[in-house]
Image (cartoon, rainbow, N blue to C red):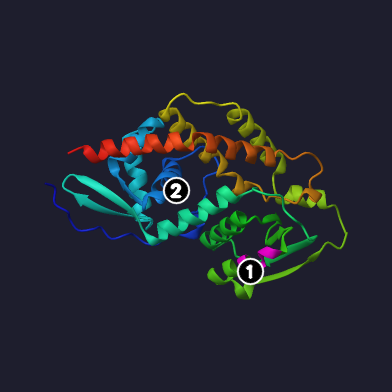
Amino acid sequence: MATRERRQPAGPAAEPSERHRETTSPSARSILLTILGEFVLPRRGEVWTGTLVDAFGALGVEAKSARQALARTAAEGLLASTRYGRRVHWNLTPAGEQLLQEGTERIYGFMRKPQEWDGRWLVVTVGVPETQRQLRHRLRTRLTWLGLGSPSPGLWIVPDASKEAAVRAIITELGLEDRAFAWAGPSAGIGDATKLLMSAWDLDDVEQRYLDFIDRFEGVSVSSDREAFINQVQLIQEWRRFPFLDPDLPGELLQHDWPGPRAAATFHDRRGRWHRRAQDEWDRMNDEASART
């Protein structure tokens, strides 16, 4: 019978600036976060290495890349390992659970219902020198994930004054209180709001991404549990980018039929159709990994 060895300590806590940064082709780490959030988090945050390697294999990712992604994620403090003989069992750390829970709420809640807008904007100015690149990156990543856009250096905007407390928390966490100033209120009607929005966000690119998402997934059906698993991971991989790219603007600021709500409907419909079969495939892979000696 395999003996249980000492649990490996987690690495340093993951930087908030690392969260949800993959917006191009998915990396092995990005796929791992999707799998952890969709299949591991609901199961007490526990998983065998073999299960993850099999899952990556189904998605066309080599075992070496899967193990490297695991090692990197553990080094960030999101996973901790326990060795049973030659096998390794992973558990989400508190930091990992928090990260995935926040991501799950953001991804599945994004564009779930129409935004009610009171006409107020939140405007933030914050200066970070070019020499402090890491701090600038952390600030940009956090504010972008919150939905703010930057039409010019040092200036951030969002047509949602209710995000004031969240912005304040970010500014405080990063120690930028003495470099920032913010105010909220309605537009003074000076200038072209459309030009402002286009300079703060690449809305043409976001719109095309939505249309591509709809074309790719709207009519897809699956014939097996394995196909359901593969397609569901790919579906979530694509959808998880949109909360980072799209500020979810009020309808009053959009000049045409925005495809975001239709893409959201496609996402929730496909996930609902594939969820049970994808979970069954995960359980099958996990059972096989558990049975290995």
Instruction: Indicate the quadrant where residue 178 lies.
Output: bottom right
Residue 186, percent from left and from top: 82, 64
**Which residue is disc 1 drawn over?**
165
Which of disc 2 and disc 1 is earlier in sequence?
A: 2
Mark 2 crowd level (few <14, some 14–19, many ≥20, 10 Å Cα): many
Dot 1: element: helix
The answer, for residue 235, to whether it is visible in the render is yes
Residue 163 magenta: yes
Q: CA distance from mark 1 to mark 2?
A: 26 Å
- In the rendered image, the residue lying farthest to the bottom is 178
The residue at the point 54 percent across, 38 percent down is 272
**Identity of the amino acid at label 2?**
Gly
Mark 1 crowd level (few <14, some 14–19, many ≥20, 10 Å Cα): few
Instruction: Indicate the quadrant where residue 139 lies.
Output: bottom right
**Which residue is disc 2 drawn over?**
37
> Which segment is the magenta one?
162-166
